[in-house]
C-alpha cells in the first residue's frame, strides 16, 4: 500500500492557492494531492525558460526565444507564441551588461507546511545589484495576493536563494516585473500566510 503524500507545496502552487477563495481552495489542494500521489505533472515551459536564460547569458536579443517557438512541439507552439511578445518585452528592459546569477532553492516552513522556494534564475546588473526572478506564465495577470506571497517568501529566504538580492515576480505574458511594495507590513503578511498554510495543510489531510 502506498503511503499517503505528505503535505508540501512549491512556491508556484502555494501562490496559486492563496489566490483562490471558498470551495476553489479545497478543489485545488485535492488536485495537488492526487497529482503528487500519482507522480504526474509536466512543465511545458521548460524550453522557453531555457531560451530566455540563453538570451540573457549570451546577449542574444531574443534570438533564442524566436528559435524555440519554431522548434517546440506543435502541441506547445500556441503557448510559446502567446508568451513570446511579453518575454521579448521583458528582455528589452534588462540593461546591457546584465548577467545571469546562480540561485539556490530553499525550504520555507509556514507552520508545519514546507514550501519550496525555487526562483527560475538570478540576475546581476551592471550597478552591482542582484535579483532573484520567478516567472508568472498564467493567462491571467498575477493577483495582489499571488504577488505578495511570492515576493515575501522569496525575500524571507534570500540569504539562501541569492544573498543581498531583491525578489522579482515577472508576469511574462505582459513583460511586467513586480517588485516588493515598501509599504507592505511584513509581520501582517507573515500572519496571513501562516493562516493560509494551516488551512492548506488541513485541507490536504482530508482531500480524497
Image (cartoon, rainbow, N blue to C red):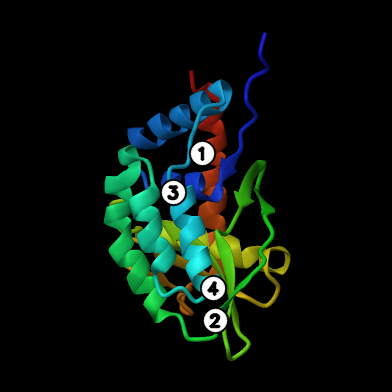
Looking at the image, is mark 1 or mark 3 nearer the viewer?
Answer: 3
Whichever of callouts 4 and 1 sits on the residue coming sooner in the sequence is: 4
Q: Which residue is mark 1?
A: 199
Point 60% across, 67% down: residue: 155
- The numbered disc on residue 85 is none
Label 1 to label 3, Cα distance in Å?
A: 29 Å
On screen, residue 21 above or below 189: above
Whichever of callouts 2 and 1 sits on the residue coming sooner in the sequence is: 2
User: How far from the left and from the top, in percent, is residue 161?
Assistant: 68, 64
Label 3 to label 4, Cα distance in Å?
A: 20 Å
Left or right for 54, reference 129: left
Q: Which residue is mark 3?
A: 45
Whichever of callouts 4 and 2 sits on the residue coming sooner in the sequence is: 4
| For the residues bearing labels 2 and 1, Cβ distance under 8 angstroms | no
Label 4 to label 1, Cα distance in Å?
A: 44 Å
Total labels: the figure holds 4
Looking at the image, is mark 4 or mark 1 nearer the viewer?
Answer: 4
Q: Residues within 10 Å of mark 1 (few under 14, many from 20)?
A: some
Left or right for 117, reference 18: right
Point 54% across, 81% down: residue: 98
* Residue 140 visible in image: no
Q: Which residue is mark 4?
A: 58
Of helix, strand and loop, which one carries label 1? Answer: helix
Whichever of callouts 3 and 4 sits on the residue coming sooner in the sequence is: 3
Q: Which residue is mark 2?
A: 98
| For the residues bearing labels 1 and 3, Cβ distance under 8 angstroms | no
| For the residues bearing labels 2 and 3, Cβ distance under 8 angstroms | no
Label 4 to label 2, Cα distance in Å?
A: 10 Å
* Quadrant assignment for the N terminus: top right
Amino acid at each position: 500500500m502506498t503511503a499517503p503524500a505528505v503535505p508540501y507545496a512549491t512556491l508556484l502552487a502555494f501562490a496559486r492557492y492563496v489566490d483562490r477563495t471558498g470551495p476553489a481552495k479545497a478543489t485545488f489542494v485535492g488536485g495537488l494531492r492526487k497529482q503528487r500521489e500519482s507522480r504526474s505533472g509536466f512543465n511545458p515551459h521548460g524550453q522557453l525558460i531555457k531560451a530566455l536564460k540563453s538570451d540573457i547569458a549570451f546577449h542574444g536579443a531574443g534570438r533564442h526565444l524566436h528559435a524555440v517557438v519554431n522548434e517546440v512541439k506543435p502541441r506547445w507552439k500556441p503557448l510559446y507564441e502567446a508568451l513570446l511578445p511579453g518575454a521579448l518585452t521583458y528582455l528589452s528592459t534588462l540593461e546591457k551588461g546584465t548577467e545571469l546569477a546562480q540561485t539556490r532553492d530553499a525550504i520555507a516552513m509556514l507552520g508545519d507546511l514546507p514550501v519550496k522556494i525555487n526562483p527560475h534564475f538570478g540576475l546581476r546588473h551592471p550597478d552591482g545589484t542582484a535579483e532573484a526572478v520567478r516567472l508568472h506564465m498564467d493567462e491571467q495577470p498575477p493577483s495582489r495576493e499571488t504577488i505578495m506571497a511570492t515576493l515575501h517568501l522569496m525575500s524571507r529566504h534570500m540569504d539562501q536563494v541569492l544573498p543581498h538580492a531583491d525578489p522579482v515576480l515577472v508576469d511574462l505574458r505582459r513583460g511586467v516585473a513586480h517588485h516588493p511594495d515598501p509599504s507592505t507590513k511584513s509581520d501582517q503578511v507573515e500572519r496571513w500566510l501562516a493562516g493560509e498554510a494551516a488551512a492548506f495543510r488541513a485541507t490536504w489531510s482530508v482531500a480524497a
